[in-house]
Amino acid sequence: GAGMGMTAPVSITAFPAEDGSLQQKVKVYLRIPNQFQASPPCPSDESIKIEERQGMTIYSTQFGGYAKEVDYVNYAAKLKSALGSETAYRKDFYFCNGYDPPMKPYGRRNEVWFVKE
């Protein structure tokens, strides 16, 4: 029953298939605002879980516009190419992040994150 408002980024875990497309399983993360961090309210929906995300080092690329799946896939491919074959990062998933509300038409920020191994 506690209203927390929207947080940024909205982070979606993408699971790439062999061909680079995304599998149809998705995990969405929303950051719990600071005032609720110590004692988060219990979700009333059983499909919502509270998880603590451990600290991580990421490799990131940023782009604008209204991001679609194809945009995240393309920017993930560009980031993979930029990192080359010598860089160690998790290949089984990556994060697709959006920072803006849907009604913001300009200056939008999106990112792809690879997690360093």
Image (tube, rainbow, N blue to C red):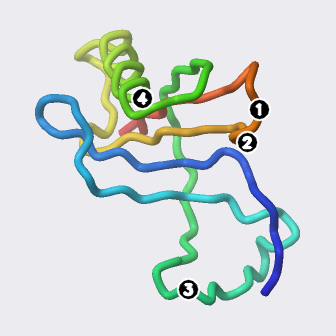
Which residue is identified by label 2? Answer: 101
What amino acid type should be assigned to the residue bearing mark 1?
Answer: Lys
- For the point 23% across and 16% down, the residue is 85
Name the residue rendered at 52%, 26% in the picture: 60
Kind of residue indicated by mark 4: Tyr
> First in sequence: mark 3 or mark 2?
3
Q: Are marks 3 and 4 in contact (CB under 8 Å)?
A: no
Cβ–Cβ under 8 Å for marks 2 and 1: yes
**Under tag 1, what secondary structure?**
loop
In this rendered view, identify the residue nearer to me: 102 or 24.
Answer: 102
Q: How far apart are marks 2 and 4 (CA)?
A: 17 Å
> Which numbered disc flags the more N-terminal residue, 1 or 3?
3
Tell me which numbered mark, 3 or 4, is placed earlier along the sequence. Answer: 3
Circle 4 crowding by C-alpha within 10 Å: few under 14, some 14–19, many from 20: many
Residue 72: mark: 4
Q: Name the residue under label 3.
A: 45
User: The disc labelled 2 sits on which kind of residue?
Assistant: Pro
Residue drawn at x 26%, y 40% as measured from the top left: 22
**Disc 4 element:** helix
Q: Distance between the residues labelled 1 and 4?
A: 19 Å
Q: Residue 104 carries which label?
A: 1
Spatial CA span between label 2 and label 1: 6 Å
112 versus 11 height, above or below: above
Is residue 51 or residue 89 the one in the foreground? 51
9 displayed left or right of 60:
right
Q: Position of residue 19 (x, y in %)?
A: 13, 29
Quadrant for the C terminus in the image? top left
Q: What residue type is labelled 3?
A: Asp
